[in-house]
Amino acid sequence: MITNLLFLGASTLVVKNVGNITQIIG
C-alpha cells in the first residue's frame, strides 16, 4: 500500500512537470 502511494505521488509530479513543460514550449 505504501508503494502505491509513492507511485501515485511520483505520477502526479510527472504529470505536473509535463504540463509545465508543454506550457513553456507552447
Image (cartoon, grey):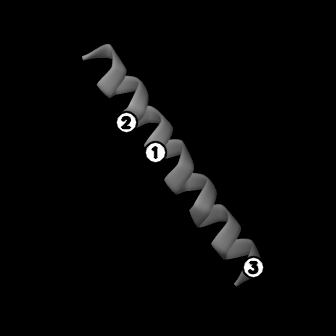
Residue 19 vertical position relative to residue 8 in the rendered view, above or below: below
- Seen in the image, is 3 located left or right of residue 23? left
Sequence-wise first label, 3 or 2: 2
What residue would you read off at disc 2?
8
Distance between the alpha carbons at the discs numbered 2 and 1: 6 Å
* Outermost residue toward the right in this view: 24
Q: Are marks 2 and 1 in contact (CB under 8 Å)?
A: yes
* Outermost residue toward the front in this view: 3
**Callout 1 amino acid:** Thr
Residue 15 vertical position relative to residue 26 in the rendered view, above or below: above
What kind of element bears circle 3? helix
Q: Are marks 3 and 2 in contact (CB under 8 Å)?
A: no
- Look at 30% across and 26% down and name the residue there: 4
Within 10 Å of the Cα at label 3, are there few (<14), some (14-19), or many (20+) other Cα atoms?
few
- Look at 58% across and 65% down and name the residue there: 19
Q: Position of residue 7 (x, y in %)?
A: 40, 32
* Outermost residue toward the left in this view: 1
What kind of element bears circle 1? helix
**Callout 2 amino acid:** Leu
Quadrant including the N terminus: top left
- Seen in the image, is 8 located left or right of residue 16? left
Distance between the alpha carbons at the discs numbered 3 and 2: 26 Å
Distance between the alpha carbons at the discs numbered 3 and 1: 20 Å
What residue would you read off at disc 3?
25
What kind of element bears circle 2? helix
- Seen in the image, is 3 located left or right of residue 17? left
Sequence-wise first label, 3 or 1: 1
- Look at 45% across and 44% down and name the residue there: 11
Q: Position of residue 13 (x, y in %)?
A: 54, 43
What residue would you read off at disc 1?
12
User: In the image shown, does 9 or 4 lie closer to the viewer?
Assistant: 4
Q: Position of residue 24 (x, y in %)?
A: 75, 73
